[in-house]
Image: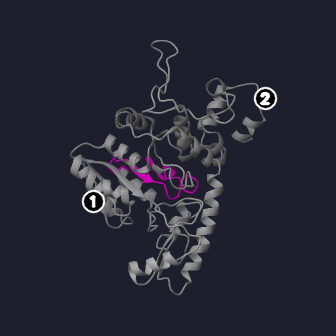
Amino acid sequence: MSNEQRFFLRDPWVFDPKEQRSLRTDTHLGFDTRALHAGFHPLDDFEAFRSFVPPITPSMTFPYKTFGNTPNPVYGRTATPINRLLEDRLASLEGGGAGVTAGSGSQALFNLIFTMARPGDNVVTSLNVFGEGYKQAAHIFPQRCGVSFRFVDNPSDTDSWDARIDANTKLVWVETPSNPCLFVTDIAAIAETAHSHKVPLLVDNTTATPALQKPIALGADIILLSITKFLAGNATVLGGAIVGSEDLIEDIRWNTTEFVGAVMQPMEAWLTLQYLETLSLRMGRHSANAQAVAEFLSQHPKVCHVNYSGLPDHPQHQLAKRQMKEQGGLLSFVVPDGMAGAAKVMNSLELVVHAVTFGTSRTIC
């Protein structure tokens, strides 16, 4: 009998704390089960929430029951109960020890690097990271914090990663699949290279989400997520998260987030919890739709090239099939005549929204 069967077939009024803890954290439970339940049970948490659906907790501070008995969380700048629930759920879905949210994906990245690196340290990454992350790497941290970034030209070349890591490297950072060119990096290979230098590997899992890709199972140590994209999935939430070891997450929470204060708002955390319940279903449909569009575009006479790892001619197609459950909902393509040609295509589209994001229920270009 599976863990899920044992839990749901037991006497509902006989509580075993070990079973309740298992429901919160056991990665052997199914992904969809954890997307619904991880971190919360309406009976187990009755005294805290008194609600079938976890309620929004907009309070910015949390009172002491007795003097000296400090509540956790204590102040909205570090977390609220609904944020902590979301953090536990994301950690469960990614297979990490703990999680901490932030006001955006860019803020989550900033909080991580600000926590881990000091002046004179460096981070090794590639040119395939997302635009706002690249700005932090190329300008903000080197110019204002004294932390340098070393860029790998070809993420498939493990020797290039190895050559750029030295005694001052605090982090190796990859994004896979990358936005917007859909380059797929071999997580296991880069993890082995980083770990040979005793350096942790950060994987930005925003494009795939934990529904399609499990970087920690492949050797990654830390996960970066833009909740704004597929995790929330309908352009109503701005947020980000880091998943990693409990020690790292507590370091970020108490030594960076508490002072920077750019936290995810309780309403947005609550909305994300609702959207996570359908993440697996949504990513399956996104993947099927993107595959159909990619195949159509690849046969179109006016399309020069399509970037989508689900196509057999994608350079990392076989790696992507091994590393991901499905190939996700993001693609890009090239048309003749450069920017003018791209503008002509975009302005000729119907039903497709022109907006600066991805991962929503609508097609965006």
Which sits in the foreground, 250 or 240? 240
Q: Residues within 10 Å of mark 1 (few under 14, many from 20)?
A: few
Which is the main secondary structure of the residues drawn in magenta?
loop
The reply to whether discs 2 and 1 touch (Cβ–Cβ < 8 Å) is: no
Look at mark 1 in the image and give the residue it sits on.
Answer: 163
**In the rendered structure, which disc, 2 or 1, sits on the residue that comes first in sequence?**
2
Please identify the quarter of the rendering in which residue 311 is found. Answer: bottom right
Q: How is the image coloured?
A: one colour
Residue 79 on image: x %, y %: 47, 33
Q: Residue at x 65, y 39 (%)?
A: 37
Residue 20 on image: x %, y %: 65, 31
Q: Residue at x 50, y 42 (%)?
A: 96
| Secondary structure of the residue carrying numbered label 1 | helix
Residue 361 on image: x %, y %: 60, 60
> Quadrant where the N terminus lies?
top right
Which sits in the foreground, 51 or 44? 51
| Secondary structure of the residue carrying numbered label 2 | loop
How many marks overall? 2
Look at the image and say whether residue 309 sits in the magenta stretch: no
Q: Which residues are magenta?
A: 195-223
The nearer-to-camera label among 2 and 1 is: 2
Look at mark 2 in the image and give the residue it sits on.
Answer: 11
